[in-house]
């Protein structure tokens, strides 16, 4: 497949492997339609935002495999993967995607739990006596 563009997107604990193939606009995530995999319409709009910014619409089919994390992290990972793949398609897409903040990897991760504490920041209740 010569016209296949692949990219990896990550967010929180999620990793998405995205393939863009010239086609009619079929979008599948883990073998399901994107609207079925991400049931909330606002999440689907966020995932497909790179296509709106570059106005490539229905020119590419999206095949994404995503694992790890929750639905929010997975949606962010797929969005980053699509944006990176679009840059591989055409380097001129880099500037509008960068200005929209779609090429920036969100570095925020869950903070680890510390020993002797209830969580990452929360402490056990202090008792003076």
Image (tube, grey):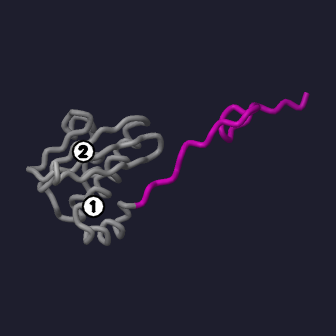
Marker disc for residue 88: 1
Does residue 60 appear left or right of residue 103 in this picture?
left
Start-end of magenta stretch: 104-129
10 Å neighbourhood of mark 2: few (<14), some, or many (≥20)? Answer: few
Does residue 48 appear left or right of residue 77 in this picture?
left
Residue depicted at 10% across the width and 50% down the height: 23
Does residue 24 appear left or right of residue 91 in this picture?
left
Does residue 105 appear left or right of residue 8 in this picture?
right
Q: Residue furthest right?
A: 129
Residue depicted at 24% across the width and 64% down the height: 53
Give yes or no for contact between labels 2 and 1 (Cβ–Cβ under 8 Å). no
Gap between marks 2 and 1, in whole Å? 27 Å
10 Å neighbourhood of mark 1: few (<14), some, or many (≥20)? Answer: some
Q: Secondary structure at mark 1?
A: helix
Q: Residue furthest front?
A: 2
Q: Which residue is mark 2?
A: 41
Q: Secondary structure at mark 2?
A: helix
Residue depicted at 37% across the width and 38% down the height: 71
- Which of disc 1 and disc 2 is earlier in sequence? 2
Q: Horizontal and vertical percent for residue 50?
A: 26, 59
Q: Horizontal and vertical percent for residue 24?
A: 8, 50
- Judge depth for marks 2 and 1 and give the one in front: 1
Query: Is 110 placed above or below 2 here?
Result: above
| Snapshot quadrant of residue 88 | bottom left
| Snapshot quadrant of residue 37 | top left
């Amino acid at each position: 497949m010569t016209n296949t563009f692949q990219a990896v997107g990550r967010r929180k604990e999620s990793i998405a492997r995205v393939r863009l193939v010239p086609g009619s606009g079929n979008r599948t995530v883990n073998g399901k339609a994107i609207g079925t995999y991400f049931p909330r319409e606002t999440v689907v709009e966020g995932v497909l935002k790179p296509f709106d910014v570059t106005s490539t619409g229905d020119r590419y089919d999206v095949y994404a495999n995503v694992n790890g994390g929750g639905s929010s992290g997975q949606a962010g990972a797929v969005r980053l993967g699509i944006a990176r793949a679009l840059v591989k398609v055409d380097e001129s897409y880099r500037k509008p995607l960068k200005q929209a903040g779609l090429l920036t990897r969100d570095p925020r991760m869950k903070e680890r739990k510390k020993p002797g504490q209830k969580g990452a920041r929360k402490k056990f209740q202090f008792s003076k006596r």
